[in-house]
Amino acid sequence: MPALASPLIHLEAAIILAIIAALSLKLKLLDLKGVTASIAIGYVIIVLGGLNYFAILLAFFIISSIVTRLRVKAVGELHIDKDWVRGWRNVLANGLAPMLAILIPRILSCDERIMAAGYLGAVGTAFADTLATEIGLFYRGKPRLITSLEKVEKGTPGAVSPYGYLGCIIALIILGALAWILGAASPKLALMLIPAGVIGTTIDSLLGAGIQGKYKCRECGRIVENPHHCGQQAQYLSGLTRINTHMVNLISTILGALILAALTALL
Ligand SMILES: [Zn+2]
């Protein structure tokens, strides 16, 4: 564990995280609880993984924030409620699996290759799913439900489109290339990240269409994943109310980590 060898890493982590926390609050990328959760996750990743691992997660956060802002400018807020996506729940949904992917292999003294694979599988799935959602909102046609293939409104849990899968693959190529440049992944791992991330994102859509709680907005009539829409309580439609979009994200990022770690161990 070279990262633990130097006590300076704690100071570096504190300085870097303080700067990022201040910028995130100033730019309104996260609320206060979201920043607190990010600091905890970032600290574990920097100290136990290293700055290169943290840079990969930071790139995901920065690129996703920029793409969300561009999408809001181009096509509006649509179905995604700002307060719903920028709080601590969103941070844990996307950051908990990457943190565990570093923490657990360190505790168990696993091979560094397996740790890198699990970490990239988790961040890759989170990033691919985020870009798939954002780029998918630019799709002019109606997306289809991944299970029945019927056409549904944009924003319906489990809806997929060609633009969505394009966003997913772009995210995985960017992340794989970055991980390779930063020395966190071999070229082989960076390439294997693409199928693993596509599978992770597809699992996310299947869970969204299957078990995720769905609601019908009383105001606009859309099927939504948020129990509140258009400023009021939406009507329960189907799925498990305990399984919201954040739970689906958490489950699919954990599975993305396990898939890439298993592929790396086997191949
Ligand atoms: Zn509505």
Image (cartoon, helix red, strand yellow):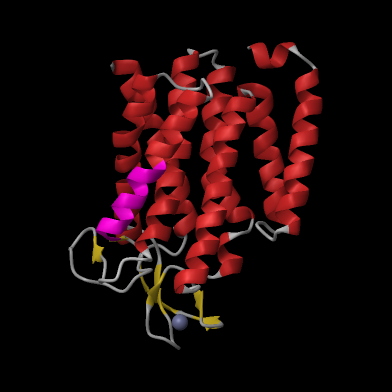
Quadrant assignment for the N terminus: top right
Find ligand 1 in the image and state its quadrant.
Answer: bottom left
Residue 138 image-quadrant placement: bottom left
Is 88 in front, or is 49? 49
- Compare residues 54 and 262 and report the one nearer the observer: 54
Residue occupying the point 23% across, 58% down: 146
Of 220 and 255, which appears nearest the observer? 220
Q: Is residue 251 visible?
A: no
Residue 102 x, y percent position in the rendering: 56, 26
Residue at left offset 56%, top offset 41%: 59
Quarter of the rendering containing residue 140 = bottom left
> Residue 242 appears at what percent x and percent y?
47, 60
Say left or right for 33 vs 121: right
Q: Is residue 2 above or below residue 71?
A: above
Q: Is residue 25 magenta?
A: no
Q: Is residue 202 left or right of residue 111?
A: left
Residue at (29% x, 41% y) in the render: 199
- Residue 205 pos. (x, y %): 32, 54
Q: Point out the residue furthest to the bottom here.
A: 219
State yes or no: residue 161 in magenta.
yes
Q: Quadrant of the C terminus?
A: top left
In this picture, is 226 found above or below 261?
Answer: below
> Residue at 35% of width from left, 42% of height from top?
200
Residue 61 in percent (x, y) is at 57, 47
Residue 106 shows up from this direction: yes
Q: Is residue 230 left or right of residue 199?
A: right
Splitting the image into 4 quarters, where does residue 85 fall?
bottom right
**Residue 135 falls left or right of residue 159:** right
Range of residues picked out in magenta? 160-171
- State whether the magenta stretch is mostly helix, strand or loop: helix
